[in-house]
Amino acid sequence: MTIALSRREFLKVSTALSGGLALEFWLPHTSASADGAAAIEVNAWIVIHPDDRVVIRIARSEMGQGTCTALAQLVAEELDCDWAKVSAEFASPNEHIRRNRIWGSMSTGGSQGVRSSQDYVRKAGASAREMLVAAAAAQWRVPAAECTAASGLISHGPTGRKLRYGEVVAAAAKLEPPRDVRLRDPADWKIAGKPLHRLDIPDKVLGKPVFAVDVKLPGMLHASIAQCPVFGGKVASVDARAALEMRGVKKVVRDENFVAVVADNWWRANEALKKVKLEWDEAGNGHVDSQSIAAMLREGLADPKLPQARKLGDTQAAFAAAAKLVEAEYQSPYLSHATMEPQTCTAWLKPDGFLEIWTATQNGEASMAAAAAASGLPLEKIEVHKMMLGGGFGRRGGPQDFVRQGVAIAQAMPGVPVKMMWSREEDMQHDFYRPASIVRMKAGLDARGRLIAMHTKIACPSIIKVLMPDAPIKDGIDFSAVRTFSDMPYDVANQQVDYAMRNGHVPVGFWRAPGQQNAYYRECFIDELAVAAGKDPVEFRLAMLKEGGKDRLVLEAVAKAAGWGSALPNGVHRGIAVADGFGSYAAMVAEVSVSAAGKPKVHRIVLAIDSGYVVNPDTCRAQAESNVAFGLGSILYQEINIKDGRVAESNFHDFPLPRIAEMPEVQTVLVPTGGFWGGHGEPAILPLTPAVCNGIYAATGKRIRSLPLKHHELRSA
Amino acid sequence: MLKLTVNGRTHTVDVEPEMPLLWVLRDHLDLPGTKYGCGIAACGACTVHVDGEPVRSCALPVSAAVDKKVVTIEGLSENGPNRIQEAWIEHEVPQCGYCQSGMTMSAAALLAKNPNPTDTDIDTAMTNLCRCGTYPRVKEAIHALARDYVAPAAKKA
């Protein structure tokens, strides 16, 4: 697919500003047709060439989740064009601003891509189709109602005449868009709903320069940066003499919060950075460690006046009347996103004051805003080129630290494009981490083993408070810290959820399915309750889920697909969990074993997921596999520890990712029930950790109340 | 001055002999398909072939590649996608795609030596890290390539 750089409007701007400078990217699809005829914009989302090629503009970012293809499928479905002639390109953030935010949200997170833009992108496709039909009807001087469109061809029924979209696009683009359009019933979909090949894959497989780190510009220099290892600290002193004498080094840039070495290749910049003598002002945080953070969270749990995220009935009275009480404390550590492509930003402050940026961002508009704030330039004088992301998982959306740094470096090197890339060590030690948290749960069962009351206390940093300090937080509750408890689907008459916001100095952020640790806590605790009640974990849950509910439906679907209750090979055990979030409902069965030496192995994962509709079943399956792989490392061995105010881990040797040998088989059962639109990028990670840990319990009799598993002795006694 | 043969072409580069091959490829020879992931030979995003062997170019000094044949992802696909890349497209292997150059180069090296690898062979040879979880499809694509493989003896028959 083409990328933002190929946009006609941008090429015009760029050519005007840079004196006709040719940029080193492959031939764009949109700039001109083979015969030199210009492509024509029907509406903001759709550009059609005279030779019928269709370019669909995508406002969201592509990080491998398949949003470019899924959104293009939805547009193409309503446009009813020939899918073989469709390509996609990113909408330009600069043009987005100039055209009054015409593409809606550019934010790419929360599994929102399809579900929150499906309505307006489908309408754009339907509207364009009606305009094309109207243009053909006008050319034939017949009523539009006598014409139909299919696969890029308009037909006049009574006479059998036909016109291609490319033949009428010029006339169609001049028409007023229809006021109202009717969207197709998903039951009639021909392009959407099909497992079509992703548009972005061929370029990626061929090693084409599609990523932000692949950007190459004339005279471009490279930068590597060092930030204060203690979060919140500042640069105190810099001695760059040795670095400046090293080969290829052009400049050492000192900012308030970081130092960057600019050189003629990245390795030279990074080697020279190691030779810069740096002193830091640690802002008083140099004493913080994982133990003091745990103490901070425990102090929160002991706070008698916590705000309540949910209050149903009277838990205290119910506990007093309960036949059995069960209590447990669970916890989990900070985690890094560890995107394979480190944070990167190429920025170029041009002589005429225009600022161009190439970056891997989950929100092109947020990157624009960060660049404007950092540079002092108006948005109209900035362009952000959205490149393919080498992984996102929430790292590159809210925080735009890399853009601010790229701009600061560009301002220190006016007229010269500089590509900044973080080293892996910098990336791992300056993330916005999945929050560490501690949760205490107390439950009451009645004489028949039914859950009658549950009280949950959650101590967890607030992502919203850290990323958006000025955003109002209603009643002291950050939803991402309390979810899965505050909206628990189980029918329990007495519920209370207390939230202790304890933030500390470690930056926290949106890590795939923010709040996903609560699904681990809740669903493992529910498993404990099932055992305490002497009931089967599936039966125990089903008894609390109302008939016709989606959580119930996926739980039943997964139990059936996984053969819950059937025999397994010797030593293999099952665990189950259900959770909803990000618009979808997901239930999972994990088949696990623990070796005599105490080594856990996940053999197979069965997932049932209801997302309402499925736009591309193959990418939905790929996202299930992705969630399993992403979550598996955090179950087995990943953790971010804090020592002396800084992150102790630094690279993949001490923050390992699972390898192919550890990857379980993943069987995905798509059970879309229609009537709502749910996401796929995140929901499947919710039930993963509890399903695996409940399986470990089934295998060993040991409850896993903290992660990762590497700290647990799993050998049988 | 160091002389390098990359993708069948000879280049003369004026760089420090200790500079890792990765950076010569990316920043001097304009071959950005090979990726930086960790710099400590842990992730395999930088995998290239040196005399047919898969090598992590982030930890190989360029001087060690002199007088050897280096092939990068760009060299694998000079005449359109090769069969491994075609299988990668057919089986929709990549997600974000960042690790896939290295993954593909490792698979190419494995299949060149072992045209019909078992799961265990794949687990042993394919140590590249993928954060997106493309592993089941990597395995599926390699097995599909093995199934399609026609052994020299069978070809004659």
Image (cartoon, helix red, strand yellow):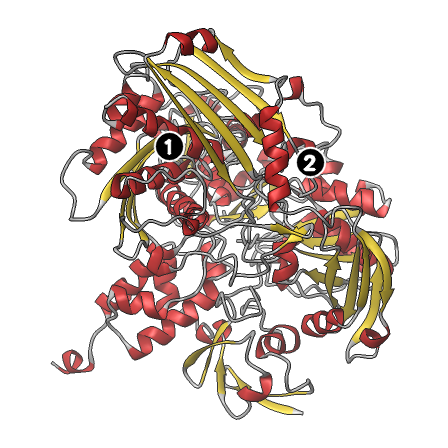
Residue B24 in percent (x, y) is at 62, 78
- On the question of residue B81 being in view, the answer is yes
Q: Which secondary structure, mark 2?
A: helix
Q: Quadrant of residue A236?
A: bottom right
Q: Chain of mark 1?
A: A
Q: Chain of mark 2?
A: A
Residue occupied by mark 1: A524
Residue A302 in percent (x, y) is at 59, 25
- On the question of residue A460 being in view, the answer is no
- Out of A354 and A694, give the one closest to the viewer: A694
Quadrant where the N terminus of chain B is found in the figure: bottom right
> Which residue: 78% across, 68% down?
A262
Quadrant where the C terminus of chain B is found in the figure: bottom left
Residue B10 in percent (x, y) is at 56, 89
* Name of the residue lying farthest toward the front: A717
> Which residue: 73% across, 70% down?
A274
Q: Indicate the amino acid at tag 1.
A: Cys
> Which residue: 42% across, 23% down?
A676
Q: Which secondary structure, mark 1?
A: helix
